[in-house]
Amino acid sequence: MPVINFNYEDLCKMIGKKVSKDVLMHRIPMIGADMHDDDESDEMSVEFFPDRPDLYSAEGLARSLRSFLDIDTKMKRYDVVNTGITMNVDRSVKDVRPYILCAAVLDIDINDDILRSLMEMQEKLHLTIGRKRSKVAIGVHDLDNVEQPFIYKAVRPNEISFVPLAKTEKWDLDEILKNHEKGKDYAHLLCGKARYPIILDSKDNVLSFPPIINGVLTTVTTKTKNLFIDVTGTDEKAVKGALNIIVTALAERGGSVGSVRMNDGTSFISPDLRPSERKINVKECEKFLGRKIGKDGIIKALKRMGSDASADKDDIIVLIPATRLDIMHSVDIYEDVAIGYGFENFGSKHELSQTTGKKRDMTVVSERLRDVMIGLGYTEVTTLTLSSEDDEFIVSGLPEKNVVKVKNPITEDHTCLRSSLLPSVMRVIRKNKHRDLPQRIFEIGDVIADTKRQRRLCAVATHSKTSFTEMRSVAESVLREMNISYSLKECDYETFIKGRGAEIIVRNEVNGYFGEMSPEIIIRFGTDRPVMFFEMIVSAEISTGLF
């Protein structure tokens, strides 16, 4: 989970009130976090749960604590001033890194604490909702060093050269990927692309080579007063959320959020900091939480969580801040109500509805089969569900079926999902051929046969005196114990010695087979002793009288 480092005095300054360390140590975990030990210094650390990226900075934490500690429960709203800045988005990026949103933050006094907090927040967002920049990458620039309008487009790897951050010489995009530390770390994100994304100003100065590195021209320092922020990625919702979190955090530091007109075939203003609206039912919320809180209690709890809320008959209208990416369903709002109300106030045990559970019919049948097979002297084994098409059909001699293939198999032995249990069980026999005979094993497991999932039973016996008669008696004992009506029919599978294989017919369909394995198939499986086996489909519907 992300660890946020902050200065105690700096946090209190943003909260707008001196809050004791003891209160912070006690209350911050109630939001959903783990406070690290206090070493009596002003430097503090808190580890937040991954569902709250809006708290990945001291600024976001201060905003949340103002509401949670009842210092100011009015939902924070941020004005967006018109800057006249334009970002043109070229169609060439659609197949490379399709989404981009931008904003400006003006008139901000950046000191070392703010700069450190900004860099930490940027990296935390990259690692979490950004999925190590594959989903979201954030660029922060000194706006005064470039001139708008800006353009976001895709170019050939050797088409543009610029000086990247932390370097002094110009490199083209391919050279950056090969030589720069960040290029080496994130080159895989552009692997296979014929063109790379780039952000330029009106004079063709490079602001950013997303998701890799910014240009040295727009380096942010303590002398920077106006910022330009770009967020690119492959997920539009994540891009929007990351931008909102960044700009509102900087607004908490006194900056003024400025608009950027995005032109990508349509024209719209970014960022969009308007709250979203959801409606929840009071009774449903109380039922979910197991406690009667009332309209006023729910509204108060939601305001403590930074949202706004009002009553509408039996419902609550909730306005959710644009920074809350974790609110996706009504249950997320219910969770906010619980946190805002205070888990410590729930007290009594949650009322539970009385329900009666029972085993699934298939589970009952499988357990009965295990008892039957163990009673017949067989030992249960459990094998992998992955197999290979060679083992399933060529080695086993069983009729070929459509199988589910593994797209990128690691080994030749694991190229598909098994369509029969026999090859899996025979691998156990092969690996134990050095052990004493007789060997009698069985498995009850799932297979995928012709794209349909089936539960099956397979039993294998190997010893010098095993015979077709022995396996027939085992198969018929199982069928009889499971109350299955059946008939037998000669089977001509290559798997069996001719005349020593039989199909099990249930309800006019082939439900399984048993018999004596042919010497050729035995050798293919890598053993040299007589083998008898049977395999059948397990079904609750055909096992009458068990329920």
Image (cartoon, rainbow, N blue to C red):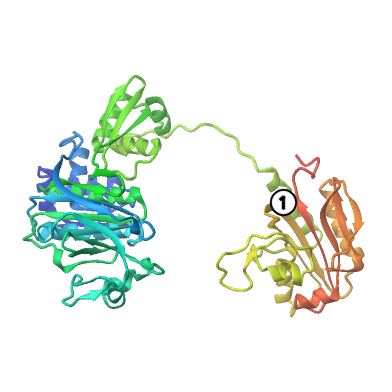
Q: Nearer the viewer, residue 304 or 209?
A: 209
- Name the side, left or right, on which 403 lies relative to 53: right
Residue type at mark 1: give it.
Answer: Ser
Number of residues whose C-alpha sits closer than 10 Å to that of mark 1, classed few (under 14), some (14–19) or many (20 or more): many
Q: Quadrant of residue 23?
A: top left
Place residue 315 in its image quadrant.
Answer: top left
Residue 58: percent from left, percent from top: 18, 52
Location of the C terminus (image quadrant): top right
Pinpoint residue 100: horizontal percent, then vertical percent.
Answer: 29, 53
Question: Taking 131 as reference, is 428 left or right?
Answer: right
Q: Residue furthest right?
A: 499
Residue at the spot 23% in from the left edge and 57% down from the top edge: 151
Q: Quadrant of residue 133?
A: bottom left
Please state which of residues 476 and 291 is positioned toward the viewer in this rendering. 476
- Residue at point 24%, 33% (across, down): 303
x then y, percent, for residue 307: 26, 35
SS category of the residue bearing label 1:
helix
- Name the image quarter holding the N terminus: bottom left
Give whichever of 330, 6 is nearer the camera.
330
